[in-house]
Image (cartoon, rainbow, N blue to C red):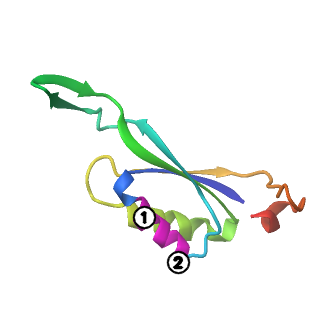
């Protein structure tokens, strides 16, 4: 099993959700986050004053999948979140030791 964490642009979340639904991904956690990578933020004007926006709004997706789905899920996220511009995001894949469904006590892949 793997734990996939993706950081994407906010306006791409629906595209990614639809791409993952097509792969029958059972669920995900979506969190609104702020951060920066190579973008390093940007400057904006507000009432004539210029200020720096250091942290840009992003969406963090967290998905647990079986080993057989990892490549398809990563590719679906990458394709759906792609704009070709800086700040498209990143996908991280971690080994997932175990999963336990609280309600039934199921463990491992059956708990996903």
Q: Measured from the top left, where is residue 81 in percent x and y?
A: 38, 60
Residue 71 location, quadrant? bottom right
Asked if the stretch drawn in magenta spans residue 31, the answer is: no
| Label 1 element class | helix
For the N terminus, which image quadrant? Answer: bottom right
Pick the front one: 76 or 71: 76
Residue nearest the viewer, comparing 63 with 94: 63
Q: Position of residue 38 (x, y in %)?
A: 32, 37
Tell me: residue 40, above or below residue 76. Answer: above
Residue at the image point whose x is 25% and y is 53% from the top:
85
- The first of marks 1 and 2 along the sequence is 1
* Residue linked to disc 1: 14
Q: Are marks 1 and 2 in contact (CB under 8 Å)?
A: no
Image: 16 above or below 56: below
Residue for badge 2: 22
Q: Quadrant of the C terminus?
A: bottom right
Q: Is residue 100 left or right of residue 14?
A: right
Is residue 86 left or right of 34 when viewed as pictured?
left
Write down the region rendered in magenta: 13-22
Q: x and y percent of residue 42 in the render?
A: 23, 33
**Residue 18 is a magenta residue:** yes
**Residue visible at 90% across and 59% down in the picture:** 105
Give the number of the disc on residue 2: none
Residue visible at 60% across and 75% down in the picture: 24
């Amino acid at each position: 099993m793997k734990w996939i964490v993706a950081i994407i642009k906010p306006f791409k979340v629906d595209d990614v959700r639809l791409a993952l639904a097509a792969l029958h991904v059972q669920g995900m956690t979506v969190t609104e986050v702020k951060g920066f990578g190579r973008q390093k933020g940007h400057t904006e004007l507000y009432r004539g004053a210029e200020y720096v926006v250091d942290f840009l709004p992003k969406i963090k997706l967290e998905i647990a999948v079986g080993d057989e789905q990892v490549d398809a899920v990563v590719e679906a996220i990458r394709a759906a979140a792609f704009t070709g511009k800086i700040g498209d995001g990143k996908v991280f894949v971690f080994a997932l030791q175990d999963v336990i469904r609280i309600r039934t006590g199921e463990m491992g892949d059956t708990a996903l």
